[in-house]
């Protein structure tokens, strides 16, 4: 939540008593990393999120949310749209499967 609040405060302006720099340094301190003296872009939060949540399946959604390339694929490419599970289409016949899936 510190990374979420810090990134939002950096992008939109600080709300509340914690600054974006304080939020990112709370995470870095807990992890044993040296604190940052200054944040120059919102990418500091994105990169810290990748380190903090490395094996939790957050990277794809963060890249899509921040409109960055996923490897060499554009964030809004249909290749990155997952199929609707079969059990959902079995229950609701009004659902139309995403393109590229049967």
Image (cartoon, rainbow, N blue to C red):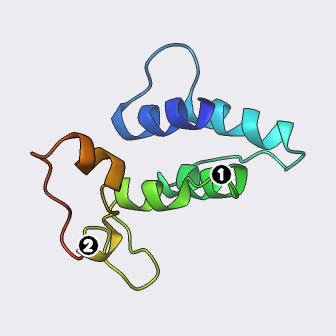
Q: Is residue 25 left or right of residue 100?
A: right
Q: Is residue 19 left or right of residue 77?
A: right
Q: Position of residue 57 (x, y in %)?
A: 59, 55
Q: How many marks?
A: 2
Q: Which residue is mark 1?
A: 56
| Callout 2 secondary element | loop
Which residue is located at x 40 percent, y 86 percent? 72
**Residue nearer the viewer, 62 or 3:** 62
Circle 2 Cα neighbour tier, 10 Å, few/some/many (<14 / 14–19 / ≥20): few
Which residue is located at x 35 percent, y 48 percent? 87
Q: Position of residue 6 (x, y in %)?
A: 53, 34
Q: Is residue 84 left or right of residue 98?
A: right
Q: Position of residue 62 (x, y in %)?
A: 46, 54
Which residue is located at x 69 percent, y 58 percent? 54
* Quadrant holding the N terminus: top right
Q: Position of residue 61 (x, y in %)?
A: 44, 55
Q: Is residue 53 left or right of residue 80?
A: right
Alpha carbon distance from label 2 to label 1: 26 Å
Q: Eyeballing the image, is 43 above or below 102? A: above
**Residue nearer the viewer, 63 or 16:** 63
- Does the image show residue 56? yes
* Quadrant holding the C terminus: bottom left
Residue reaching furthest bottom? 72
Residue reaching furthest front? 90
Which residue is located at x 19 percent, y 61 percent? 97
Circle 1 Cα neighbour tier, 10 Å, few/some/many (<14 / 14–19 / ≥20): few
Q: Which residue is mark 2?
A: 101
Q: Nearer the viewer, mark 2 or mark 1?
A: 2
**Residue nearer the viewer, 68 or 82:** 82
């Amino acid at each position: 939540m510190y990374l979420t609040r810090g990134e939002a405060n950096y992008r939109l302006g600080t709300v509340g008593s914690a600054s974006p720099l304080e939020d990112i340094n709370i995470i870095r301190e807990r992890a044993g990393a040296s604190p940052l003296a200054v944040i120059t872009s919102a990418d500091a939060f994105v990169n810290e999120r990748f380190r903090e949540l490395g094996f939790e399946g957050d990277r794809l959604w963060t890249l899509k949310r921040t409109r960055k390339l996923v490897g060499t694929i554009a964030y809004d490419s249909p290749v990155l749209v997952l199929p609707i599970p079969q059990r959902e289409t079995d229950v609701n016949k009004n659902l139309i499967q995403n393109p590229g899936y049967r």
